[in-house]
Image: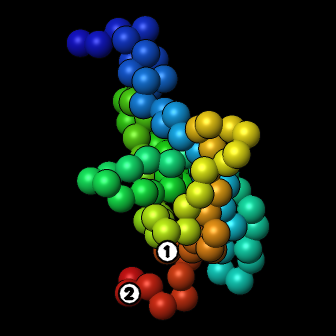
Amino acid sequence: MATAEQNRDRRQGGRASLRVVHRHRIGSAVSERVSDLVYINGHPFALLGWVDLDGIRTPLHVCELDPTKLRADADEPHLFHYDDVTAEVRFAPDRPW
């Protein structure tokens, strides 16, 4: 069984080191936000939400990004900007459920 100290270390190790600044739409509202940026099989994703599963920080909501609209920040080496609007699929009016 893992100790609380081991769980905290795993939770801290799960954080992404890259960040992305993007405009994000929830319903009709659009605002700017900063999200973790990860690459999965070579495709960029913004991590929109996290959940703690037994002490392990796990991605809950993701949004795939168009790599042609992603650009590196000139001053911050681990920061990117996304030149489009991402959308929260959980609140999309035409979602199938």
Real-space Cα separation, disc 2 to disc 1, in angstroms: 10 Å
Mark 1: which secondary structure? helix
Horizontal side, residue 78 vs residue 16: left or right = right
Q: Residue 25 carries which label?
A: none
Q: Are marks 2 and 1 in contact (CB under 8 Å)?
A: no
Q: Residue 96 carries which label?
A: 2
Q: In this view, does 9 lie above or below 62?
A: above
Q: Which amino acid does label 2 sit on?
A: Pro
Q: Is residue 26 among what the camera can see? A: no
Looking at the image, which residue sits at the far front?
A: 74
Locate residue 58, reporting x and y percent. 40, 41
Locate residue 43, reporting x and y percent. 36, 59
Q: Is residue 94 among what the camera can see? A: yes
Horizontal side, residue 27 vs residue 42: left or right = right
For label 2, the crowd category at 10 Å Cα-Cα, with few meaning under 14, some 14 to 19 and many 20 or more, is: few
Mark 2: which secondary structure? loop
Horizontal side, residue 75 vs residue 15: left or right = right
Locate residue 8, reporting x and y percent. 46, 17
Q: In which quarter of the image is residue 70?
A: bottom right
For label 1, the residue is 89
The quadrant of the rendering that contains the C terminus is: bottom left
* Residue at 51% over, 56% down: 46
Q: Quadrant of residue 55?
A: top left
* Residue at 38% over, 36% down: 53
* Residue at 49% over, 74% down: 89
